[in-house]
Amino acid sequence: MLTHTISKSISIVTILVLLQALCYTTKAQNCGCSSDLCCSQFGFCGNTSDYCGVGCQQGPCFAPPPANDVSVAEIVTQDFFNGIISQAESSCAGIRFYSRGAFLEALESYSRFGRIGSADDSRREIASFFAHVTHETGHFCYVEEIDGASKDYCDENATQYPCNPNKGYYGRGPIQLSWNFNYGPAGTAIGFDGLNAPETVATDPVISFKTALWYWTNRVQPVISQGFGATIRAINGALECDGANTATVQARVRYYTDYCRQLGVDPGNNLTC
């Protein structure tokens, strides 16, 4: 991850898990909930949207809104993709790693990305995703966080996803996936060993894009209707929002509004956090 875009906020996930534990008689499990409760993406039982909504694994899960017929591939053209990556220096590792082809192959596993709501909503979501990716990777320059190996991204309280002491869970990939509590479930969902082989995100470009789409569809897409500012909060809110770092917020907004312009859609309201 870039030095100015450090980790996904530990507080968002930790607080959510704690609230789940406090509000219901819950336990970590392999979806062993009673028949009237949902097993959340974090493995806890409950019956609200936090449990039965996005990421619900089992039980009376809420049906997601229907997908539209937008073709993401027709919006994310080679010219659009090249317009981002061409701004990276030729020495960047990402130049030889990221590609539109890898993105589209990863997209096959996430059919709801960019296909919720109206056609304009789809374009805004795509602009939002690539705005954050541009900011996190420096126009697809970086595959791994600068000096990431020297930083500690192991949350020992996330006992469901125990850290391997020989591995680092620093930022990697288009969205700079960070922390063991993200690598663990991402690996389970995608099909790689996120806890014991987190480096896969920096060596396999399709898996790398899948981690970005996994994070997006589980953590960001649920708030996309609240405006671009809500997506900033979902990605790095604790370090940027509420005046914490207005410069990086404005940088993300500039990328977003530029991509909205390129895609021919109004950026909407609530752009900052």
Image (tube, rainbow, N blue to C red):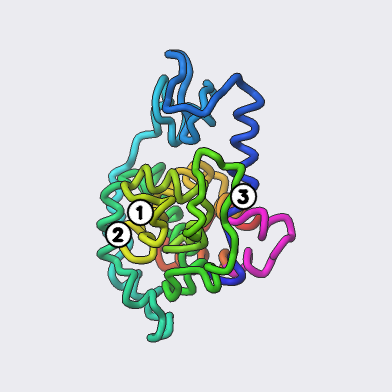
Q: Are marks 2 and 1 in contact (CB under 8 Å)?
A: yes
Residue at the top extreme, as displayed? 35
Q: Which residue is mark 2?
A: 206
Q: Residue at x 67, y 69 (%)?
A: 247
Q: Residue at x 49, y 74 (%)?
A: 138
Q: Residue 28 appears at what percent x and percent y?
A: 51, 29
Q: Nearer the viewer, mark 1 or mark 3?
A: 3
In the rendering, which numbered label is found on residue 10? 3
Residue at the right extreme, as displayed? 243
Q: Callout 2: 10 Å neighbours few (<14), some, many (20+)?
A: many
Three-letter code, disc 3 = Ile
Q: Is residue 120 above or below residue 240?
A: above
Is residue 201 toward the left or the right of residue 109 in the image? right
Q: Residue 149 appears at what percent x and percent y?
A: 53, 68
Three-letter code, disc 2 = Val
Three-letter code, disc 1 = Lys
State how far apart marks 3 and 2 are (Cα).
26 Å
Residues drawn in magenta: 236-251
In the rendering, which numbered label is found on residue 210? 1
**Could you say whether the residue bearing mark 1 is in a helix, strand or loop?**
helix
Depth order, front residue of 212/190: 190
State how far apart marks 1 and 3 are (Cα).
21 Å
Residue at the bottom extreme, as displayed? 90
Q: Is residue 224 visible?
A: no
Depth order, front residue of 92/159: 159
Residue 271 part of the magenta-drawn span: no
